Amino acid sequence: MSLYCGIACRRKSFWSYRLLSTYVTKSRYLFELKEDDDACKKAQQTGAFYLFHSLAPLLQKSEHQYQAPQHSLLELERLLAKFGQDTQRIEDSVLIGCSEQHEAWFALDLGLNSSSSINASLQKPEMETELKGSFMELRKALFQLNTKDASLLSTAQALLRWHDGHQFCSRSGQPTKKNMAGSKRVCPSNKIIYYPQMAPVVITLVSDGTRCLLARQSSFPKGMYSALAGFCDIGESLEEAVRREVAEEVGLEVERLQYSASQHWPFPNSSLMIACHATVKSGQTEIQVNLRELEAADWFSHDEVATALRRNNPYTQQQNGTFWLPPKLAIAHQLIKEWVEKPNCSTLPA
């Protein structure tokens, strides 16, 4: 009996350890904050806040990178008081994550007006002077942030934008109310619950076996080429969306495809980028560019793409007239890098 009890106790301890792993406890903690307004408000007491102004994050320059400063609740309350603002404005903040020690992280936009706020937006120049930083467009600063800040600020901007655009119920027209964490909005009149959403986008690197196809839109920075990308239509599977987008944009038919990875992308309105490799049918490689979608598209050799990956400064490349690729943080870069390292990765039938 004693041996049995010993084994049982050790098993219990083992499973308790597994249930209390860092990832699980963080996930459970964030779930609690999203579901319990009181718990979330308590977490704000010891949490950290990232500040925005009209969806632009507050950043500070540090050598060749930007850093996103954090502010405590006390510092935020003092800041609001100094500018004649009610601390109730803090309730407009959204939960964006937490540390392994369960320090909750929030984001607050001081330039947007919510339907429930009694305060006007704060003036940007005065705030920048007081905070010793600049509210910068995230798209321009994203690739000069470290991975943690880039991920947090992307999540924050997407949530803040979603709340700004969903302040009223589409059914009743009445103002909706966000929960403390910002994980949902509820219409008080009909109890409809609205949840933040992402639009699925397929991003596909097409290959003919020895070359890959890269394209550019007119909105791209000068000289930048990337993989094909497009929104999934309602009713489509991932495979169907890839085949349709490739056919629409460059007039090619996909023979095989392989899933690679996914990434949240905050621009323009929060998308889930689903990256795939695809191979076109043998002997059918003539590109027919859809000029409504693309400015240009072409086949590039393995050596050309490998050389482009080794280049570090896109601005130098523009001056030299050579093409350049999306920065390392973008999933398109990872997709292209995978192909260079393993050109024959598109092996699954579509």
Image: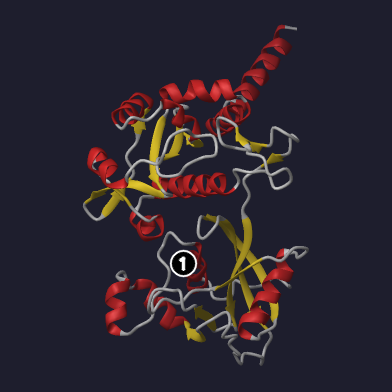
Left or right of residue 39, residue 319 in this image = left
Residue located at (71% from left, 10% from top): 5
Where does residue 9 sit, x and y in percent of width and height? 66, 14
Residue located at (38% from left, 76% from top): 324
Left or right of residue 168, residue 155 in this image = left
Where does residue 199 sit, x and y in percent of width and height? 63, 57
Compared to residue 309, the image places residue 89 above or below, namely above
Tell me the quarter of the image containing the N terminus. Answer: top right
Where does residue 241 sit, x and y in percent of width and height? 70, 69
Residue neighbourhood size for the residue with mark 1, other residues' Cα within 10 Å, grouped as few (<14), some (14–19), many (≥20): some
Compared to residue 281, the image places residue 164 above or below, namely above
Q: How many marks?
A: 1
Q: Residue furthest right?
A: 235
Left or right of residue 181, residue 100 in this image = left
The residue singled out by tag 1 in the image is 333
Residue located at (27% from left, 76% from top): 316
Residue located at (63% from left, 28% from top): 35
Tell me the amino acid under the disc marked 1. His
